[in-house]
Image (cartoon, rainbow, N blue to C red):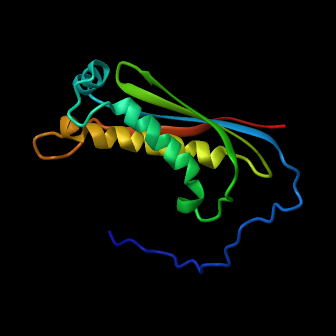
């Protein structure tokens, strides 16, 4: 079956003007999870992953991603980040990453929280990919899923 594609003309892109908005406290919390094999989860819990401490490295990656969000998402404003919290919960088949970001500024921080979660989960995958590969080099069990905003608060 032949696929057909519709051409969409690229329109003008611009950042939203937030100059007239007041500076107020803002907070957002996002989460997501990575599915891993039981053996990989045991290696992470016991600290025996070849590349090192998986969750400590993923925590640093999340912080970097939050701080660099405007560098990777073109229409995001550079905003003053006042706090970043990164937590992980290891389940039976998954690790959940939760990132909370705070700011005092003119725009929300949900994109920063989502970027932090995404970077944390991708870092986990990178650090355990040798343990997750099957004989053909694929990842039949590994998946990143359910990345979402849990909460967005302003004021």
- Judge whether 21 appears above or below 14 on screen: above
- Judge whether 77 appears above or below 143 on screen: below
Q: Nearer the viewer, residue 82 or 138?
A: 82
Q: Residue at x 44, y 43 (%)?
A: 61
Residue 85 percent location from the top left of the image: 58, 31
Hey, which quadrant is residue 2 in on the image? bottom left
- Judge whether 12 appears above or below 121 on screen: below
Tell me the quarter of the image containing the N terminus: bottom left
Residue ranking furthest to the left:
135
Residue 129 percent location from the top left of the image: 24, 41
Q: Residue at x 60, y 47 (%)?
A: 112
Relative to 50, is 122 on the left or the right? right
- Judge whether 154 appears above or below 105 on screen: above
Residue 106 percent location from the top left of the image: 80, 52
Hey, which quadrant is residue 49 in on the image? top left
Tell me the quarter of the image containing the C terminus: top right
Q: Nearer the viewer, residue 131 or 59?
A: 59
**How many marks are shown on the rendered structure?**
0
Hey, which quadrant is residue 110 in on the image? top right
Q: Residue at x 37, y 42 (%)?
A: 123
Relative to 155, is 116 on the left or the right? left
Q: Residue at x 87, y 55 (%)?
A: 21
Q: Nearer the viewer, residue 110 or 19?
A: 19
Residue 79 percent location from the top left of the image: 70, 53
Relative to 100, is 49 on the left or the right? left
């Amino acid at each position: 079956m032949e696929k057909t594609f519709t051409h969409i003309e690229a329109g003008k892109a611009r950042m939203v003007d937030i100059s007239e908005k007041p500076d107020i406290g803002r907070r957002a919390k996002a989460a997501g999870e990575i599915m891993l094999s039981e053996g990989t989860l045991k290696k992470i819990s016991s600290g025996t992953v070849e590349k090192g401490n998986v969750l400590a490295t993923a925590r640093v990656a999340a912080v970097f991603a939050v701080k660099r969000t405007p560098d990777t998402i073109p229409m995001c404003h550079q905003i003053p980040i006042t706090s970043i919290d990164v937590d992980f919960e290891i389940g039976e088949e998954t690790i959940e990453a939760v990132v909370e970001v705070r700011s005092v500024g003119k725009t929300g921080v949900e994109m920063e929280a989502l970027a932090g979660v995404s970077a944390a989960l991708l870092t986990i995958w990178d650090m355990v990919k040798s343990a997750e590969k099957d004989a053909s080099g694929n990842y039949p069990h590994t998946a990143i899923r359910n990345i979402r905003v849990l909460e967005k608060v302003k004021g």
